Amino acid sequence: MATPNKAGPARAAAADPRHEAEMAARAAWLHFVGGLTQSEVAKRLSVPNTRAHRYIARAQNEGLVRVFVDIESADCVALETRLMAAYGLSTCRVAMEAQESGPLPLRALSVIGADYLMQVLAAGDHEVIGIGHGRTIAASVDAMGRTSGERVRFVSLLGGLTRSYAANPYDVIHNLARKTGAEAYLMPAPLFANSAKDKEVMLAQSGLAATMELISEASLVIVGIGDMDSSGGGASTDALEGPDAIAELSRLGASAEILGQFLTAEGEILATPYDKRVMAPALDSLRGREVVAIAGGESKTGAVRAALRSKLLTGLIIDEATARRIVEEL
């Protein structure tokens, strides 16, 4: 069998010069300051050894070691290290701050999120990848170059058929399939069924049963994190009964939302009336898999912290300012 060409996605990611400069700075910091070998740098950044070597050489040739590593990338890598140690993460990427036009750091997160997704596809370690919802995931998929994903199947982790999200799960999964050529499977249902009985009826249908079975096979799950701000336009606002429902959930102790389910500020899974209606896998069923969140922004600080405390996450892609706020409270 021919060996897959893993250089294609990396070449696509190289189209953004600013991204390449950041990666060179990260590699240089890990090598010269962190004391890692080139092979260890490659493993940390999820790139081939030859590419890690080129990043380090570029940092030396272009002066990135002095300008970027000492000033910017060192801070980001240090934040990554602190977050990984504090919350037992196996993966953490902190995106350098960039000028943003809105309250969410979508520009910074989309670049680093797209790079992560393309590296995952290049590595080929996962046959089934579950995809959640959220504007950060949608922006990351939008920022991806065309990448080979023929050996991967993507599956939506939740429904959204009858609601108008800021980032519809179906649009995200369709965009992934278009850019990668991978098979992609939808959850043809609303996020919340009208009743627990309606959920039972829907799950008895062959199409939905097959989707839920595929979700159970996903070894990597990529999720967004919602907060309880009713003005944020997230899934919790659009799919529930408006701000009053969100206020009631907040009163019950909800601080974060993942896949239509809720966490307290301490990271405990909160039992709510929506649990028996949500068309998504139970959060506890994600334990034991790779679960990576792409999230950030000042309003999401508490929600991201709650998700980290839950120990559901094995990986986090986050912006520099939000990472710093979380680390400062450790």
Image (spheres, helix red, strand yellow):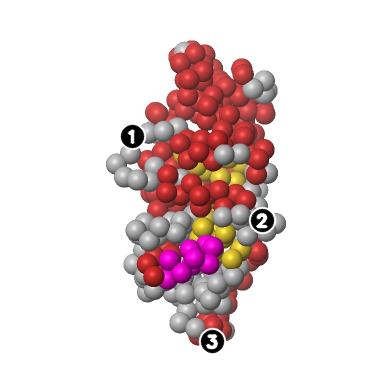
Disc marking residue 11:
none
- Residue position for label 2: 289
Mark 3 Cα shell of 10 Å, populated few (<14), some (14-19), many (≥20): few
Q: Secondary structure at mark 2?
A: loop
Q: Secondary structure at mark 3?
A: helix
The kind of residue tagged 1 is: Gln
Magenta span: 245-254
Image location (x, y in percent) of residue 39: 67, 27
Disc marking residue 197:
3
Q: Is residue 251 left or right of residue 310?
A: left
**Nearer-N-terminus badge (3/2):** 3
**Front residue of 85 and 60:** 85
Mark 2 Cα shell of 10 Å, populated few (<14), some (14-19), many (≥20): some
Residue at 62%, 33% (x, y): give it.
81
Q: Name the mark nearer the viewer: 2 or 1.
A: 1
Mark 2–mark 1 Cα distance, whole angstroms, equals: 34 Å
As drawn, the residue found furthest toward the left would be 101
Residue at 63%, 60% (x, y): give it.
268
**Nearer-N-terminus badge (2/1):** 1
Residue at 56%, 55% (x, y): give it.
265
Q: Name the mark nearer the viewer: 3 or 2.
A: 3
Q: Is residue 207 magenta?
A: no
- Residue position for label 1: 99
Mark 3–mark 2 Cα distance, whole angstroms, equals: 29 Å
Quadrant of the rendered image containing residue 28: top right
**Nearer-N-terminus badge (3/1):** 1
Image location (x, y in percent) of residue 160: 42, 69
Residues at circles 2 and 1 in contact by the CB criterion of under 8 Å: no
Image location (x, y in percent) of residue 313: 61, 51
Residues at circles 3 and 1 in contact by the CB criterion of under 8 Å: no
Residue at 58%, 29% (x, y): give it.
78
